[in-house]
Image: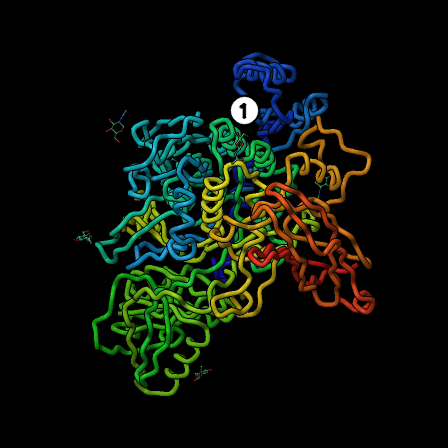
Amino acid sequence: MISPGLHALQSSTVPMKIFFIFSLLLLPLLASCAEQKQVYIVYFGEHSGEKALHEIEDTHHSYLLSVKETEEEARASLLYSYKHSINGFAAVLTQDEASQLSELEEVVSVWASHPKKYSMHTTRSWEFVGIIEEEERHWTSNKMGGDFLSKARFGKDIIVGVLDSGVWPESKSFSDEGMGPIPKSWKGICQSGPGFNSSHCNRKLVGARYYLKGFEHYYGPLNASEDYRSPRDMDGHGTHTSSTVAGRLVPNASALGGFARGTASGGAPLAHLAIYKVCWAIPGQSKVDGNTCFEEDMFAAIDDAIGDGVDVLSISIGTSQPVNYTSDGISIGALHATKKNIVVACSAGNSGPAPATLSNPAPWVITVGASSLDRAFVSPVVLGNGIRLEGETVTPSKLEENNMYPLVYAADVINTGVPKDMAGQCLPGSLSPEKVKGKIVLCMRGSGMRVGKGMEVKRAGGVGFILGNSAANGIEIACDAHVLPATAVLYKDANRILEYINSTKHPIATIIPARTVLHTKPAPFMASFTSRGPNVMDPNILKPDITAPGLNILAAWSEADPPTKLNGIDLRVAQYNIYSGTSMSCPHVAAAAALLKAIHPNWSSAAIRSALMTTAEIRNNLDMPLNDESGDAATPFAYGSGHIRPTKAADPGLVYDASYRDYLLYMCSIGGVKDVDPKFKCPRSPPTATNLNYPSIAISKLKSAITIKRTVTNVGAGKSIYFFTSKPPLGISVKASPSMLFFDHVGQKKGFTITVKARKEMLSEHDEDEYVFGWYTWTDGLHTVRSPIAVSLA
Ligand SMILES: *[C@@H]1O[C@H](CO)[C@@H](O)[C@H](O)[C@H]1NC(C)=O
Ligand SMILES: *[C@@H]1O[C@H](CO)[C@@H](O)[C@H](O)[C@H]1NC(C)=O
Ligand SMILES: *[C@@H]1O[C@H](CO)[C@@H](O)[C@H](O)[C@H]1NC(C)=O
Ligand SMILES: *[C@@H]1O[C@H](CO)[C@@H](O)[C@H](O)[C@H]1NC(C)=O
Ligand SMILES: *[C@@H]1O[C@H](CO)[C@@H](O)[C@H](O)[C@H]1NC(C)=O
Ligand SMILES: *[C@@H]1O[C@H](CO)[C@@H](O)[C@H](O)[C@H]1NC(C)=O
């Protein structure tokens, strides 16, 4: 993840490899078939609710029959018939058949499903480690407060659907001991298959299904040694995200030989979970690289989740590049879910720190960025000159206490013939056993797997290993469970170690075993990998919406996958694991939404998102603005409205509400409403996109001034007066009219306008595409309702 070196590897070598494999697969196919077939999604909008389920499938079948030669062919080509909310089907079609269908009046749109477009939003898996630390200080225990959790009854009666790689049902995190009954509204099922049957569902795991027709159409039959053809998780990711949403409190949990013990807990420990397995291992690829989730499979899962009766959906899946709302299965599925008032939380993606990299930018989902916790696994390096440098690791193995070891820099102990630019990287086979034996080796990040560098030191006979950040890694340290005693240090500290090595004939050092340190500062800070705005699909909507912990997060794990995902090399089994990515932050927000839903069952999904956003925190625990991993101030394009504060969100004072209709009016303005809901009649002049009643403001290419409309709903005290304040972006003025809002009952709505105006001199001198940021608030003395503002000038 975290290392731009690895990113470079990811974005250059890997796609080339994929492309190569691709061409090998496709060439014979292209040669033999005149008309290439692929999976298309044929979309009709929404069900009218008049037809029985079997009638719907018959209808879809008859459409297929109109383009296929035989009844049999039509039946065989149908992968899914979407029956609950989404009206449509997925089928194997030629391009010609697809275009014939798209010409039919009732058909809203037809699009080809793209293989390898979607994957789970974790960083690369060698980032991961397998331990449970001494005291898991879950964000919930500290930041939420017992009052809030008990008011939310720990999420009781709320059902959260998780689209991911399945679940490891035996984990103690999914025990249903002492849980309330399954909500009566639940209509889902427990699907069985290898390693999974109905007895694996319980009052915690109320449902579990799997979807792989799209996957199998593309890759052929699932290889049973690579994944379970059932809801069981062979990857770990789905177990991790679902236990982060709603794992039980597990006291004295331990892993890896009882190395450490502590309490693990999800955000809403009494909420129920519904598992939708949609992501699968890519055949023949290392688990470290490979997982994929097909659009037609996810579409079916979302449709079922709506029919099953989930309250919240957590989707840590997306693309690595932005995709139009109207040709994205997650976005369209989420719009259907939103209509049923299901809150949908999605990960922003791990394509940062570059700008304009966001995934899942639709305004009806909560788009979640990733930031750090205030926790570190401190394992210092002590040098022979007495200097002690902070390091971090979760490596279980330890050096002998009170013993110093010879210390070398990897570049000085290489085999002959290793290229100069790779020296210091500890790439496989690069170190000379003669020069390394019995020593601690300093290796730098840049290329190659982090865990692999430790393996190389071990192979060469080293006793310990220090992993140095490169300058680009900033203040973000990746915690790994290495295969030998090890720690990881910042770039500046790696340089101090180098200086020390240079300064003496016989450099020596030791590594002190890791211990968990809480309340580290500054925290939180933004993870470098978190995808950034602006939202290229529509710069009038500020994204991401919010940030939550996503760096070095501990949660339950699949026992079928080693903690480092290095199958066949790492033989450890971990019940809990530390993992990073916006995949990890998204379920935190889903959990917070579940708790809010438990407290405010009648709030719309927009109201819940608004409450989370307007109460979020933009300062860290040093009372300074949230930083990027570089130490510079981060912007709303990294954190949205700020870092999540669920306790505050329970009582936001005012909310910016929005309905399904508002989202369609928005689509009328930006284009594409006919591709999502053709029955909707756009007014002649729909409100502009900036006027969607969103809890944040983004203005792209401001000419001189713009006036924006918003409406707030009072959900706080009955009688109240709110005052406007703002911190305008540099060179911009921000005014509200009126600047005071009077409420006399709960539920009352008040409209206001915000006028954003550029100072004259700003209009002449600015960089193109440069954004400036600020915010405005409404305050009544008790509540502060804050909205970020992002502006670029024409
Ligand atoms: C489900 O599988 C377990 C083994 O994992 C077995 O003990 C149990 O009998 C099965 N239950 C049913 C209902 O098939
Ligand atoms: C299934 O996967 C295993 C392990 O990756 C591999 O050895 C085997 O060849 C695969 N089988 C097929 C039929 O591809
Ligand atoms: C925690 O579990 C270990 C065994 O895994 C046991 O020896 C120890 O007594 C337990 N501690 C508590 C406080 O329950
Ligand atoms: C250590 O010494 C080498 C040459 O002996 C030099 O190239 C390098 O810059 C020095 N490193 C530091 C951190 O002083
Ligand atoms: C929530 O809505 C339901 C019906 O829509 C209504 O019966 C109930 O009174 C409402 N509850 C609150 C607290 O407003
Ligand atoms: C997205 O697609 C719609 C049609 O569905 C089109 O009108 C719109 O311009 C597209 N937006 C972008 C940013 O490409």
Q: Residue at x 42, y 53 (%)?
A: 144
Task: Give the quadrant of ligand 2.
Answer: top left
* Displayed quadrant of residue 328: top right
Q: Is residue 477 visible?
A: yes
Q: Position of residue 216 (x, y in %)?
A: 47, 31
Q: Position of residue 524 (x, y in %)?
A: 48, 62
- Image colouring: rainbow
Disc 1 is placed on an element classified as: loop
- Please name whichever residue, 476 or 661, is drawn nearer the observer in this view of the structure: 661
Above or below, 765 against 144 in this view is below
Label 1: which residue?
Answer: 84
| Relative side of 570 to 427, left or right | left
Q: Residue at x 44, y 25 (%)?
A: 187
Q: Residue at x 69, y 46 (%)?
A: 750
- Please name whichever residue, 776 or 699, is drawn nearer the observer in this view of the structure: 776
Above or below, 223 against 636 in this view is above
